[in-house]
Image (tube, helix red, strand yellow):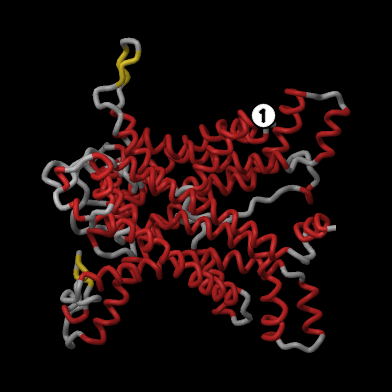
Amino acid sequence: MTCWETIQAYGLRSLGIGEKLLPRKDFTLCQEFTLIGSGLIWNIYFGVLALSAGFFLANALALAKASRSPWTRKPAEWFIFVFRGSPLFIQFFLAYEALVMLPRAGIDVFGITIATAWTTKAWAGALFVLFLNTAAYSAEIFYGALRSIPKGDLEAAEAYGLSGWSKFIRIEWPTMLRLAWPAYTNEAIFLFHATTLVFFSGFPAFAQMGDALYYANYFADKTFNPFIPYPIVGFYFILLTLLLTWIFGLVNRRLNRHLPQNLRARIRLRPQLVR
Amino acid sequence: MFTFCADPKSIEGLQWLGCYLTSGKHLDFYMSFLTVLALLAITAPSALLFGFGGATAARSHFLPLRLFGKIYIAMVRGVPDIIFFLFFVIALDQMIEYVKFLAVCPPGTPSPWQGLEFRVCPEAKVPLSASSAGWHDAYGFLLAVITFAIVFGAFAANVLYGAMQAVPHAQLETAEAYGMSHGQVFRRVLIPQMWVYALPGLSNLWMILIKATPLLFLLGVEDIVYYARELGGLKTQAYEYPHGDWRLYYFLFLMVFYLCMTRVSEIGLGRLARRLSRGQATAAGEALRRAAA
């Protein structure tokens, strides 16, 4: 089998397209690169969707946490505490066990049966957990940024006659995003890293369709040689991290475009391990 | 445990629950919480030690040592930590067995990497296959601790390196002007001052370490996640204490355990931060001074 044939057979294996059986012996470097790379599709799927949906919930949560009324503040504080204070690993297990308990046949709502079986699949259940998790972490970042908006900016806005919604959408929100962006970039990177946990926690991989680490683990188990597959995943993730830093850097440049060169916030990669 | 627990099928209600929660397996489950606490207690200082070594190496004037330190710090950025967890456990195990293989195996034995297997002669197995289950558990736990220490050491090195850089440079220059040697400046000026700068990063790291402990399950240690899955799973009439699928409740319990741990640490670390910033020339120290006045 040439390398090109391998790519055709296993390039989309993680989606169930191509060869059915995984390679069992005589592993080549090309096979490992192809399969692990194909698993990376799932990491990107989880990361992109959770991040883009979580962004909106995070904004809402940050505002709720900053509000004066305890009726909106307390729930937001609890939500953020629960998701930031417990391990993502346990959250995955808990969500899976909770979803499994939903009635198999579906739930009857006004005569319409809502199917529940799909919620226990990783693509839906794990995505939901990641979405809530990243929303909580980002909300804390946004909340911190909201509180550190310079007082002068707000006073200037009021002096110009801005108030309420227009003050928020034209002054507070852009400033919050600008201040939060470097930290949010790190959050995004570590969310992508956290997607590797999905298939190691509760959620099973159907028909051996897993993420990058799932395949790397498969190879390491089969060959008893951890020195090749794990560095390959590492290599892929370094590429992914560089790509993310670049994209978020572009946004950062746009958010800071009105500031003089020396005042612009720079993005620095701060490691934040397991969540 | 109790005398009335002899026949669990004949009792019900609270008595049943009491017997159920004190069964042998459950006592093991409670002990596994100690495993987690032990992991925290051993890993935190050793990671700090690794981190200190890494940060010092990264500041060294000797190029290879400095490169080693920088690479160690950079290692964990950009790559998911769980990959290191999975990697180091196997890699360390193979390394230890390979070293022992070189020492004890009779000459002429083929290399342990044979195609799809890693096989050393029986005398070089660690621990020996004849040793008791306790030794196997202890060895697995030890590997996990070393892995945690290496990975978290890299993070701690990153924090400590930043803290060492944050100590005002003028202080070090003044010390040198007083005629102190490099070592003396390091010991008497740099180390005592860096902790205030390192504390926010280190407390963050402690929180992360707490939240990383369930990964012990992936490293093959019988920890709380393992027991929660074992005990919570469906038990048919063949078991002493039959019950439905209770894993949800076991995991809820674990969640509450972790939330309590993080909450208690948050409060404790907050107090420590107040204590350390007393009398310091930082914003927090200034706020404390003003509050007292």
Residue plotted at (51% across, 48% down): A85
Q: Residue furthest left?
A: B238
- Asked whether residue A30 is in view, the answer is no
Residue plotted at (81% across, 24% down): A162
Residue B197 or residue B93, whichever sits in front: B197
Q: Residue furthest top?
A: A111
Q: Position of residue B238 (x, y in %)?
A: 11, 45
Residue plotted at (60% across, 82% down): B62
Horizontally, is A147 left or right of A130 in the view? right
Q: Position of residue B41 (x, y in %)?
A: 46, 67
Q: Position of residue B208 (x, y in %)?
A: 51, 56
Circle 1 sits in a helix, a strand or a loop, which is it? loop
- Asked whether residue A48 is in view, the answer is yes
Q: Which residue is mark 1?
A: A69
Q: Quadrant of residue A112?
A: top left
Residue A273 drawn above or below residue A138: below
- Subunit of mark 1? A
Q: Amino acid at mark 1?
A: Ser
- Mark 1 Cα within 10 Å, few/some/many (few <14, many 20+)? few
Q: Position of residue B177 (x, y in %)?
A: 82, 85
Q: Quadrant of residue B287?
A: bottom right
Residue plotted at (66% across, 67% down): B163
Residue A165 drawn above or below residue A267: above
Horizontally, is A235 left or right of A171 in the view? left
Q: Residue furthest right?
A: A159
